Amino acid sequence: MPCAYPAGQAWRVHKAGESPIRRRHGSRTAFRGAAGLAALAVAGSLTAACQLTPFDDDAGSSGSPSGSAATGPAGPTSAGDDYVPGDGNGGYDVQHYSLKLNIDPNAGEQLKGTATITAKATERLARFNLDLSGLKVASIKVDDAPARQQRGGSELEVTPAKPLRKGAQFTTVIEYSGTPEPVSDPVLGTYGWIRTSDGVFVACQPSGAQTWFPSNDHPSDKATFDFEITVPQGLTAIANGEPATPPTGTGGDAPGLPGAPPSTGPGGPPSTGVPGVEPIGHRARTTSKWHVKAPMATYLATVTVGRFDVRTGRTKSGVEVISAADPTLSMVNLDAFHGLNTEITDEFAKLFGPYPFDSSGGLVDNAEVGFALETQTRPVYGSFGAEPTIVAHELAHQWFGDSVSVTGWKDIWLNEGFATYAEWLWEEKSGGRTVQEQFDERYKSPLAKDLWDHPPGDPGRKQMFGRSVYDRGGMTLVALRGRVGEETFYKILKTWADEKRHSNATTPQFIETANKVSGKKLNSFFDDWLYEKGRPAR
């Protein structure tokens, strides 16, 4: 589930100009005085949003071609992650997704797609599974030969004409269509493919990618992506990565900053345009292409469609920045948002090491959701806007969560604790409370019982996005900084981000890195902060 503002009695979404009491999934602000501390006491635990139905061997086949089909061993139908039962699959490693998508938000079927999935078999396979929820599959080919399909719950079982040998690279082409259904949960709310007034907003943590493309939907199997997206004329599709065609404007101009110079150089006000859109004369549709060359977890993929104003530019270090906002959101100053994306990207590179991707930025849509998500290279925000500390949180995830991704969801504090620490850093830099004040406020509070009752190192499925993962996770890093000193602390973070760049990692591996860089044995320290109940000693 995305970084979100929870709904319900224990939560509220802020009014224009007012900060929210708390966020979940990467966009949760710090407390705001006594009211915020009271919210801590009454906040309920959060559960993961999508429980999948296991594969049913008795489910009927659909669209199965005549002819031969392989027999023999099948790959596992799950990644084996108890936090997201049924998600992911085994027996292969996806290398690349090429998604050709025709999206019409007002059509009877909003999506028609062709997914070309390049993968490597990690064992001999006569059958393998993909995650796919609800959509119709018209045809499947494996290495250009028709393959059989069988559906059960959110599982798509594929049987190629010939077995796949261990180590073989193979290509699966799936033609599919339908209207993706968002994932709904009584605690976490709605996420995934969200219909807006003029398009769709796509944010998929943890299990929403399978609702709009067939995938190995677990963060342990990252892959590169290509998107080719066709939408009705007048709409814009913005995805991850970098656009293949120059920006051209279709959304209109957003208000500029008073007195802003016309420069488009590094760090200056950017140009106006819509990235990746390729107008085709007076035809009824436009097509955009986007390329993601660094590996990406499936839940971080997005293809958000609507009418947007766009700013483009580069940071002082040369990173491309693409920022977009729905022009009907009057509370969003696009130039200020773009400038913030540019500044934070550069500032965090000084602390965490080089920015791990070729582009940065963000998108604020008119989606009536209470969350933001760190979609890779371009975080997405709901219609509440993009408060600076939220932006800092989501952009910190580009290092911690997107580039360095969890191997399993039990280690989610490696994403959210790190991003919460960065959020506190940005508040301090902006003249607000210091990081140490954030720590002390929580540590001393008699209302912080849930922090000490739910250790964040393995919080359990129901507390997967609970506030201990965020706040106690962030506090762990503050305590670590106090233990090893600031210089060594940031050397640990830079080493972690560099050595695990574009890969998956675990908490024991982070502890090993901290021990190595600091020259200290910190295992008992981390046990106290991450795994033991009760308030750790300072």
Image: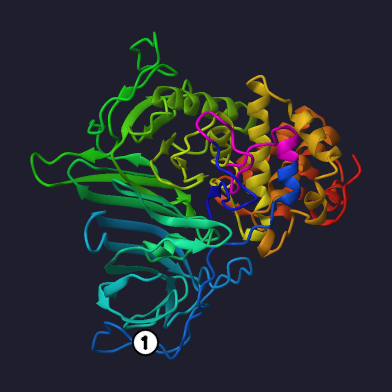
The residue carrying mark 1 is 70
Q: Is residue 523 above or below residue 265?
A: below
x and y percentages locating residue 288 in the rendered image: 25, 44
Would residue 473 be visible to someone looking at this image? no
The boundaries of the magenta stretch are 15-37
Predominant SS of the magenta segment = loop
Quarter residue 235 falls in: top left
Amino acid type for the residue under numbered disc 1: Ala
Seen from this angle, which residue lies furthest front?
9
x and y percentages locating residue 438 in the rendered image: 75, 33
Q: Is residue 176 above or below residue 58?
A: above
How would you rate the neighbour count of disc 1 (Cα within 10 Å): few for under 14, some for 14-19, many for 20 or more?
some
Seen from this angle, which residue lies furthest right?
537
Label 1, secondary structure: give it. Answer: loop
Viewer-closest of 425 and 180: 180
Viewer-closest of 490 and 15: 15
Residue at left 69%, top 33%?
32
In the visual, does 517 lie left or right of 313?
right
Quarter residue 149 falls in: bottom left
Q: How many marks?
A: 1
Quarter residue 182 falls in: bottom left
In the visual, does 323 lie left or right of 231?
right
